[in-house]
Amino acid sequence: MAIQIPRGTQDILPSQVGTWELIENKAKEICHKYQYKEIRTPIFEHTELFHKSGETTDIVQKEMYSFKDRGDRDLTLRPEGTPAVVRSYVENKMYGDPNQPVKLFYNGPMFRYERPQAGRYRQFVQFGVEALGSQDPAIDAEVISLAMEVYQSLGLKHLKLVINSLGDKESRIAHREALIKHFKPRIHEFCADCQNRLEKNPLRILDCKKDRDHELMKSAPPIFEFFNEESKQYFDQVLAYLDALGIAYEVDPTLVRGLDYYNHTAFEIMSNAEGFGAITTLCGGGRYNGLVQEMGGPETPGMGFALSIERLIAALDAEGITLQTEAKVDCYVVALGDEAKIPAMVLLQQLRKAGYSADKDYLDRKMKAQLKAADRMKAKFVAILGEDEIKMNKVVVKNMENGEQVELSISNFISEFERLGR
């Protein structure tokens, strides 16, 4: 029996990689404009790291790929990027960097054991941004603006930004007590997860998919009723910045991010494209003041987001957007006869060293078949080299667009080829 790919994973084939590269390069280019620097953290971390960042989350409780190594250490394949970035921030004392806030981005595979479905995999690629060290609401707006620009730069139009505030610590404590009081008398009517969350993190009950239609969900006290003045002013400022930047949004008091460390701003970017599917969220993020301290660092505010490349590609498909990723070959070298094989290989290497994309036939095909291969590869030029051409120190170069042919000298091929234009 042939070995098959593990469930919940996918092969990204050569024909698809160009799309991935274009998306990732575009996101990196935008991050560089915003002065965010790339950080690369290990694919596995100590399991404790993720427990510190979200003990009551579904990710920690149900979805992590955890294992013991040969030294009996508990390790976990990273299910998300933020905890590892914050761990590195603390461990490498980035809070001492004179340039504050520290603005970082990451891109790489994440792992969650969940039921695979359209756009959701057990191994997936996450692109994320973290800004650490500023309590300014302008950073919240900047992070949201950056996320929106990534999607818009790729041509997506059916986007909806949904935003909420979870308030500061004081507001959340007051809201927590109200939620416990609200749900406790009838908590037995909810799923086992919600019953476990009641005392630990009742806010997570509002994010439950199983019990979302329960009548107590609709009547649950909203967080904004418990905002102190500071929380109100902070959220108002974030919205004012978004208004000034011309970024449309919808305030949703029921929006709750699925990770324990969020406070103040929380947001999601969704796709409104027809046929996109039931799960419309493309990107999620928010502010996480307190996570750095939890990791052993000084009191440091943070703001960030993470997006799935797989879901971004699904959104492009839903809107019928095809990214132009196919790279043309600048010159395809055709060798005719045994005597031309080595000179053709030398010519090919000269082209590549001069910065051209070039290829040749490796199957000893006839000239007609080689020209067909060049056409399939969308070669701009074909350089034909046979025994007669070698004797005359000539290379026949054909423009594949208009069919025109010229003869160039073998000894000065690159300098003469330059004149034909890339």
Image (cartoon, grey):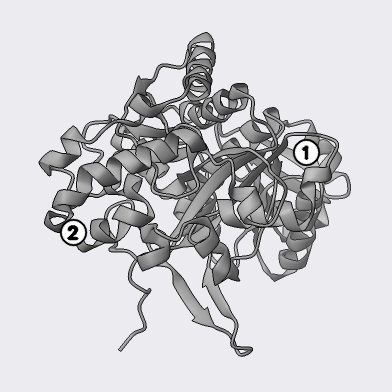
Between circles 2 and 1, the one closer to the viewer is 2
Q: Kindly tell me whether residue 419 is visible in this rendering.
A: yes
From the image, tell me which residue sits under label 2. Answer: 191
Q: Which residue is drawn at 29% across and 36% down?
A: 318
Among the 4 quarters of the image, the one containing residue 299: top right
Q: Quadrant of the N terminus?
A: bottom left
Where is residue 170 shown, x and y percent of the image? 49, 35
* Badge 2 amino acid: Cys
Circle 2 sits in a helix, a strand or a loop, which is it? loop
Q: Which residue lies furthest to the right in this view?
A: 411
Asked if residue 54 is positioned above or below residue 257 in the image, the reply reads below
Q: Is residue 46 left or right of residue 340?
A: left
Q: Kindly tell me whether residue 279 is visible in this rendering.
A: no
Where is residue 280 shown, x and y percent of the image? 29, 39
Where is residue 149 shown, x and y percent of the image? 52, 26
Query: How dense is the environment of label 2, judged by Cα within 10 Å: few (below 14), some, or many (20 and up)?
Result: some
* Disc with the residue nearer the chain's start (2 vs 1): 2
Q: Residue at x 64, y 57 (%)?
A: 295
Depth order, front residue of 271/386? 271
Query: How dense is the environment of label 1, judged by Cα within 10 Å: few (below 14), some, or many (20 and up)?
Result: some
Asked if residue 290 is positioned above or below residue 71 in the image, the reply reads above
Tell whether label 1 touches label 2 (CB within 8 Å): no
Q: Which residue is drawn at 24% across and 59% down?
A: 195
Asked if residue 331 is positioned above or below residue 83 in the image, the reply reads above
Depth order, front residue of 200/83? 200
Q: In which quarter of the image is the C terminus?
A: top right
From the image, tell me which residue sits under label 1. Answer: 417
* Badge 1 amino acid: Phe
Asked if residue 127 is positioned above or below residue 152 in the image, the reply reads below
Depth order, front residue of 317/263? 263
